[in-house]
Amino acid sequence: MEYKKVYTPTELAELLDWFTQNREKMPQELKISKSTTTSDLPNTVDSFLFLIEQNSTNPTFGAQIKILFEIKEKLIEQGFC
């Protein structure tokens, strides 16, 4: 998913649904990119999902939403979900 300042309600609903369906399959730790690693992936995802629910139309949070798309892609790529 490309970076956008504001994502559509459909894109966000699909993202939220995907993480809800795959939450139990997530590993504890994930290297998201060369410079970004999380040691508590479930908590990171929960925090970002809450952020989306509260601020989905605020362009300030577009980068955080993009990170969730990156996490999803990485989990699929690595065969977790």
Image: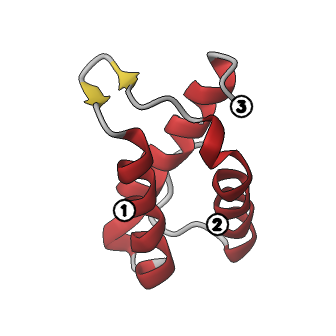
Residue at 75% across, 70% down: 10
Disc sitting over residue 81 in the figure: 3
Residue 12 spot, x, y in % from top left: 64, 66
Q: Earlier in the sequence, mark 2 or mark 1?
A: 2
Q: CA distance from mark 2 to mark 1?
A: 15 Å
Identify which residue, 37 or 1, lies in the foreground.
37
- Give the SS element for disc 1: helix
C-alpha distance separating marks 2 and 3 = 18 Å
Residue tagged by mark 2? 12
Q: Tell me which amino acid carries mark 1.
A: Ser
Question: Can you identify the residue that label 1 sits on?
Answer: 47
The colouring scheme, among rainbow, by chain, secondary structure or one colour, is secondary structure
Residue 58 image offset from top left, x and y in percent: 40, 80
Residue depicted at 62% across the width and 31% down the height: 73
Q: Among all residues in the image, which is located at the extreme front?
A: 24
Amino acid at pointer 2: Leu
> 15 left or right of 67?
right
Binning the other alpha carbons within 10 Å of mark 3 as few (below 14), some (14 to 19) or many (20 upward) gives some
Q: Amino acid at mark 3?
A: Cys
Instruction: Answer with the quarter of the image where residue 79 lies.
Output: top right
Q: Quadrant of residue 30?
A: top left
Q: Could you give the CA–CA distance between mark 3 and mark 1, rounded to whole angstroms?
A: 19 Å
Secondary structure, mark 2, is helix
Secondary structure type for disc 3: loop
Closest to the observer: 32 or 22?
A: 22
